[in-house]
Structure formats: structure tokens, C-alpha cells
Image: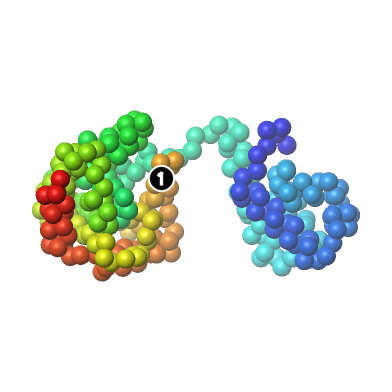
């Protein structure tokens, strides 16, 4: 075990599971360790995630505790995943970065369904708005957002242009990012892009109250090839993440449909955008 070992949340969950198995059988650390051939100290360190739980050790505990096979096999798979991730990190293997890759998916997609909670969708942001929103302290993220906007612009002239459906709450229009001049330019730009036949903008009015996916922005991408599943993209200021399991992307699609049903229509949304711009 490396001296600088720090357990991941997955490894801590595995430790809790091992302790749960033992407690269910009302065994002390000494009794359980004697049955499996471990010292009580080793078993304690595994349960408290003070050291990694090797898959073979998890398998041995599952067998000794007479845990149903599917249950201990599932924990062994988690231990294998944790072991692989730790080895990769120790070897400094490069990790795939969805935030850096996202622009490529924008180029490849046939449609984007975008829900934002506090900012104008990245594909429609002007440079001044992006700089102000990022407080100019994150040049890498600013560059990535710029690339996303440019990717959408480049697709406008395609034979099969990218379709963008965007939904966001009214608060996005009222938050004066970058000052009145920058914000007014951004709102006027939204009005301009809404004229494209491949763009749909809908605003959730303040009077709507709670709405689906509240506080959880996401982008759902669809692709032309049958072999390519839909992808949901979520991003914070720390990192971006892809979700590709059909069940999860379907949840996003359902939330988006609910948002569209609750939001104002495109015409009423445009009027609200124009109203917000006129007030600046």
C-alpha cells in the first residue's frame, strides 16, 4: 500500500459493504478474520478503507460470509474497477476529458437539446458575455466555450445543419452579466439566432414555479449513425462528464420534454427576451 494512500469514495463504499456483511452475521473482527485467514487489523483497515480492498480478498469474504453470489460478485467488480483506476492514476495515464472533447460532439451531432439554469446556452454566447460570466479567470474554459459557439456557427451552412432546442428560465434574461451593454448585446443576439429555422428558444417564466431538472443543467446530443447512442453532457466549473447509458439519456429526454411543455412558446419567449433587452 502506498504511503500517500487516500481512499476514493468508491473504496470507502466497498469498506462499508464489507463491514455490513460482517455485522449482519454478528461476527467480531477477530472471529471473521480467523474464518477467512486475515488478521483482525487487516480486516479493520479494509472495512475503514485505510487500505485498498483487493478483489480476491473481497471474493474470499463473500464466500466465507455466505453472501449470495450475485451480491459479492457485484462488489468484486467494484473493487476491480477501483484497483484499475488507482493503477492508472499512479502511472499518470492520461484521462479522457469530456469538457475538452465536447466541441467534437457538437460538430458530429444532428441535434442539441440544451437546458441551462443561470447562463445563456454556450452555443449562443457572445465573447463579451462569456468573458464576463467566467470572470476572465479561466482562460481554458473560455477558449472551450468559444470553440463550442464557433462549432455551432460553422454548422449553419451544412447540408444537414445542427438543430438546437434550448430552454432556460427567465432568470437568465434578468441576470445582467457583464453590465447592461454586454447583456443587451447578448439578448439581441438571442433574438437574432432565434430567426434561424434550426433554432428553438423557450423561456420558463418566473410564474411557472418549480420545473423539471431544476438546478441541473444538461445538454442532450443526438447523432446520425444508428451505432452512436445519444449522449448527455453535464458540466460544472470543475469538470465535464458524459452519460451514455440509454436509461439515463432517456431520463434527460423526458425532463426536456417536460420543460418544453411548461415553458412559453417560441413566440412568447421571443417577446420576453425583447422585453428584457428593452429594459437595459
| Number of numbered discs overlaid on the protein picture | 1
Q: Quadrant of residue 238?
A: top left
Residue 198 visible here: no
Q: State the residue at coordinates (83%, 46%).
A: 41
Residue 260 drawn at (x, y percent) = 26, 65
The residue at the far front in this view is 279
40 left or right, relative to 16: right
Residue 141 drawn at (x, y percent) = 35, 36
Q: State the residue at coordinates (43%, 64%).
A: 247
259 left or right, relative to 268: right
Residue in the foreground of this view, choosing between 278 and 142: 278
Residue in the foreground of this view, choosing between 85 and 9: 9
Mark 1 surroundings within 10 Å by alpha-carbon count, few (fewer than 14), some (14 through 19), many (20 or more): few
Residue 236 visible here: yes
The quarter of the image holding the N terminus is: top right
For label 1, the SS is loop
Q: Quadrant of residue 226?
A: bottom left
Display colour scheme: rainbow
Q: Is residue 231 above or below residue 41?
A: below
Q: State the residue at coordinates (16%, 52%).
A: 276
Q: Quadrant of residue 228?
A: bottom left
Q: Is residue 257 above or below residue 191?
A: below
Residue annotated with mark 1: 236
Residue 261 drawn at (x, y percent) = 26, 69
Q: State the residue at coordinates (74%, 65%).
A: 67
Residue in the foreground of this view, choosing between 94 and 146: 146
Residue 11 drawn at (x, y percent) = 65, 48
Amino acid at each position: 500500500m502506498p504511503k500517500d494512500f487516500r481512499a476514493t469514495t468508491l473504496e470507502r463504499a466497498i469498506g462499508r459493504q464489507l463491514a455490513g456483511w460482517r455485522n449482519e452475521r454478528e461476527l467480531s473482527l477477530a472471529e471473521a478474520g480467523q474464518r477467512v485467514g486475515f488478521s483482525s487489523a487487516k480486516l479493520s483497515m479494509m472495512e475503514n478503507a485505510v487500505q485498498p480492498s483487493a478483489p480476491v480478498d473481497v471474493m474470499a469474504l463473500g464466500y466465507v460470509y455466505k453472501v449470495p453470489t450475485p451480491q459479492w460478485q457485484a462488489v468484486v467488480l467494484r473493487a476491480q474497477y477501483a484497483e484499475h483506476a488507482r493503477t492508472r492514476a499512479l502511472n499518470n495515464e492520461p484521462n479522457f476529458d469530456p469538457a475538452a472533447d465536447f466541441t467534437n460532439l457538437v460538430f458530429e451531432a444532428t441535434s442539441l437539446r440544451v437546458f441551462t439554469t443561470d447562463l445563456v446556452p454556450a452555443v449562443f454566447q457572445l465573447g463579451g458575455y462569456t468573458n464576463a460570466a467566467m470572470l476572465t479567470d479561466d482562460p481554458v474554459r473560455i477558449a472551450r466555450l468559444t470553440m463550442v459557439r464557433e462549432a455551432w456557427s460553422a454548422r449553419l451552412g451544412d447540408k444537414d445543419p445542427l438543430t438546437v432546442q434550448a430552454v432556460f428560465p427567465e432568470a437568465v434574461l434578468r441576470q445582467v452579466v457583464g453590465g447592461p451593454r454586454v447583456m443587451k448585446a447578448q439578448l439581441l443576439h438571442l433574438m437574432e439566432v432565434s430567426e434561424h429555422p434550426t433554432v428553438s428558444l423557450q423561456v420558463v417564466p418566473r410564474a411557472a414555479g418549480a420545473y423539471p431538472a431544476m438546478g441541473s443543467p444538461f445538454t442532450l446530443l443526438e447523432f446520425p449513425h444508428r451505432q452512436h447512442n445519444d449522449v448527455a453532457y453535464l458540466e460544472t466549473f470543475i469538470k465535464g462528464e458524459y452519460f451514455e447509458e440509454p436509461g439515463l439519456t432517456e431520463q434527460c429526454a423526458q425532463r426536456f420534454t417536460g420543460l418544453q411543455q411548461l415553458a412559453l412558446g417560441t413566440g412568447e419567449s421571443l417577446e420576453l427576451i425583447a422585453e428584457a433587452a428593452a429594459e437595459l
